[in-house]
Image (cartoon, rainbow, N blue to C red):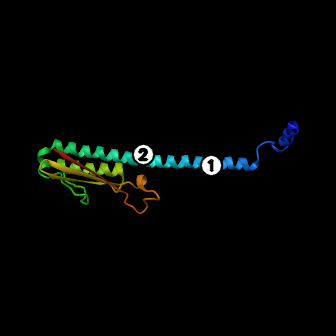
Amino acid sequence: MNSLQAKVVQKFQRGVGMVEVLVAVLVLSIGLLGLAGLQVRTLRNSQSALERGVAVIETHAIVDAMRADRVNAMGDDFDISLTAAAPTGTTFAEEALAGWRANLITSLGDDATGSVACNGADCVIVVQWNDSRGTQTTDTAAGSVTQTLRTQVQL
């Protein structure tokens, strides 16, 4: 009787059914879509991290210029607000600030700007830029995409 039952079962179990193939393709597709989503998120985070790194480097650049001309930096020659236009003068401080602002725009985009505020030897440098490529998601569509890096140094 066992051999008869085995023959009956073999008759109905030939190959893989179409439904089983479709389920396997569906599961594989969902997995691949998940991987693609992770890749996109990784690229966004990498871009955002790169921009933060550039902002730190640019902060160090203006601090080095201020330390090279410490007397004038302590005399507020390097002070500039976020909304002020880049200086156009010919002094070292004005040229350094204009070059710094130009580097910020080149490296971080057209919305990038920076400010310097010194109180004697204590200075606060702020770099601000649009990080929409790194922070814009469906969850934060209505949120702020402006990133701000604040650095406090002593000359």
Quarter of the view holding residue 131? bottom left
**Residue found at the very far bottom of the displayed protein:** 142
Residue 53: x and y, percent? 34, 44
First of labels 2, 1 by sequence position: 1
Which residue occupies the foreground of this view, 70 or 23? 23
CA separation, marks 2 and 1? 26 Å
Task: Residue type at mark 1: give it.
Answer: Ser
Residue 73: x and y, percent? 15, 48
Q: In the image, is 13 to the left or to the right of 135?
A: right
Q: Secondary structure at mark 1?
A: helix
Q: Residue at x 43, y 53 (%)?
A: 133
Which quadrant would the N terminus be assigned to in this image? top right
Q: Which residue is mark 2?
A: 46
Q: In the image, is 55 to the left or to the right of 47?
A: left
Tell me if mark 1 has few (under 14), some (14-19) or many (20+) residues whose alpha carbon lies within 10 angstroms of its own: few
Q: Secondary structure at mark 2?
A: helix
